[in-house]
Image (cartoon, grey):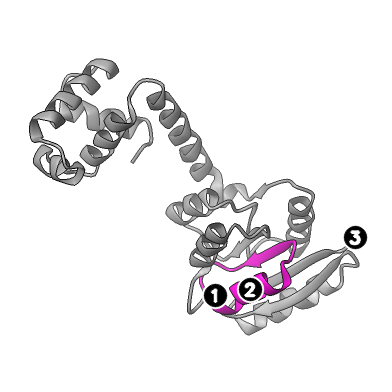
Amino acid sequence: MSIRLVIADDHPLILQGLESLLRLEPDIEILACCRTGEETLQAVRQHQPDILVLDIRMPRKDGLEVLHEMHQERLPTRVVILTAELDEREALRALRLGVSGMVLKDMLPELLVQCIRKVHAGGQWLERRSTGRVLDKLLQREAGARELAGVLTSREREIMQLVASGLPNKAVAKELYISEGTVKIHLHNIYGKLGIDSRVALLRYIQDKGLV
């Protein structure tokens, strides 16, 4: 059974090169080649490919916006990101949106083919140079979130996140439609449960757990 692909990249030469490379593979079928985010979404909706090979930086919806809309629409197509560079924030967001593969454009073409086959088989391919620190941070964040979920109530976690964003107690109270005194009571309970004694210590705790 062939692997059905849609390819998206805003550079014509790269797009043509990818198409030429992948058409040489007997088990790969290319359904569409796209140069904008809008074209990409239309092609994925229309063809429902097994895999989308997606560039991050494209006009009229970048790759992350495409990923976000696919995630919202629960489209089943698995996504492999192909990019020249990927910063930590982009990689973290892409992972949270369910990306199955990340490949840098300066890697050997054969590795992209291997990545596509592995992702099609249900696996993940995350190129360590672009995702090493991000994966470590994501794992730290998930562990911290699980730890807090077992200790704090949902309201306490909500208040903690607002405090972490830099809001004073009065602004937290306004955001949650509660009194400032109630916020102080919640903070007191949070301090006791986490074994800390001040707002500064709370911010340090949040940072240590990778929650910001």
Q: Looking at the picture, which amino acid does disc 3 mark? A: Met
Disc 2 designates what residue?
8
Q: How far apart are marks 1 and 2 (CA)?
A: 8 Å
Q: Looking at the picture, which amino acid does disc 2 mark? A: Ala
Image quadrant in which you'd find residue 206: top left
- Disc 3, SS: loop
- Disc 1, SS: helix
- The label on residue 1 is 3
The residue under the point 52% across, 62% down is 85
In the figure, is residue 116 to the left or right of 139?
right
In the figure, is residue 27 to the left or right of 76?
right
Magenta-tinted stretch: 37-57
Q: Do the residues labelled 1 and 2 touch (CB within 8 Å)?
A: yes
How crowded pointer 1 is (Cα within 10 Å; few <14, some 14-19, many 20+) is rated as: many
Q: Where is residue 18 in the image (x, y as percent from the top left)?
A: 73, 74
Q: How far apart are marks 2 and 3 (CA)?
A: 23 Å
User: Which image quadrant: the C terminus?
Assistant: top left
